[in-house]
Structure formats: C-alpha cells, structure tokens
Image (tube, grey):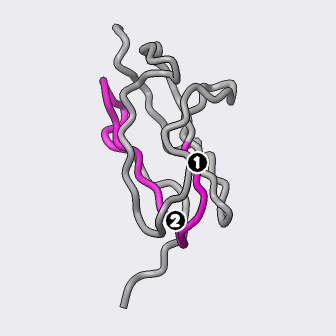
Amino acid sequence: MRPTLRGGLLQNSPNPFRPRTVIAFELPRTGLATLTVLDVAGRPVRTLLQGETAAGTHRVEWDGRDGQGTTLPAGVYYIGVSSKDNVNYDPNVNGTATGGTA
C-alpha cells in the first residue's frame, strides 16, 4: 500500500547551500503546479516549475540565479509551491547562501 501524500514542501538539501540546492515537494494528485523562489520581502525572483505535474514526490535543482540568469547575493530565500490542493510558502525551507561570492 502506498503512503498518502500530504502535499507541500519538503526540506531542501543542502541548506545552507552554495552554489546549488535541491528543492523537494509532494503533490497528492496530478495537476497544475508552480514552484517559486522568493526574496525576504516576498517578491518572486525565479519560477522553477510551472505547469502540469504528476502526483508524487518531485525534486527540482536551483542554482541560486534569478529569472534572468543573474547570480543572487547570499541571503535567505523562501520557496513556495502552489497547486489546486495546496499553497505553501514555508519559511522553514530556504536557501541561506547562493552561488554569489561571499
């Protein structure tokens, strides 16, 4: 028997990271999903995934860059996942360092 997926974000790894991290999330059923990186002010800096996504656990790599390909400065970033079943901007799942120089 398969475990029931709760949906939402899982812990990214590594955290803190430099220069890449893998963001894991679950979807309880297939549907449209969006995975977004936000700065501490809540502004979106990059959309990592947007579109039809199968139910299950997924992993997406983030290279610490914004939507234009610019390396972001070291800092705290929040990860948000939204789907029909769930909207989750979890402050406990964040990157505390990016690929920028320290």
Which image quarter: residue 39? top right
Counting other residues with Cα less than 10 Å from the Cα at mark 2, is it few (<14), some (14-19), or many (20 or more)? many
Q: Is residue 22 magenta?
A: yes
Give the position of the N terminus as an image quadrant.
Answer: bottom left
Element at badge 2?
strand
| Labelled disc at residue 34 | 1
Which residue bears the numbered disc 2? Answer: 27
Q: Are marks 2 and 1 in contact (CB under 8 Å)?
A: no
Q: Is residue 62 magenta?
A: no
Q: Within 10 angstroms of label 1, few (less than 14), some, or many (20 or more) residues?
A: some
- Residue name at image x 68 percent, y 63 percent: 84
Q: Position of residue 16 (x, y in %)?
A: 36, 31
Residue lying at the far top of the rendered structure: 101
N-terminal label among 2 and 1? 2
Residue 3 shown left or right of residue 68 in the figure? left
- Count the marks: how many? 2
- Above or below 46: residue 32: below
| Placement of 92 over or under 98, stated as above or below | below
Distance in Å between CA atoms under marks 2 and 1 = 11 Å
Q: Amino acid at mark 1?
A: Thr
Q: Which segment did they paint magenta?
A: 13-35
Q: Residue at x 48, y 37 (%)?
A: 94
Residue 26 in the image, given as x and y percentages of width and height: 48, 62
Type of amino acid at the residue the image marks with label 2: Leu
Image point (54%, 40%), residue name: 79
Q: Secondary structure at mark 1?
A: strand
Direction from residue 63 to residue 55 in the image, left or right: right
Q: Residue furthest bottom?
A: 1
**Residue drawn at the location 30% of the way across and 24% of the way down:** 19
Question: 90 above or below 48?
Answer: below
Q: Position of residue 24 (x, y in %)?
A: 41, 52
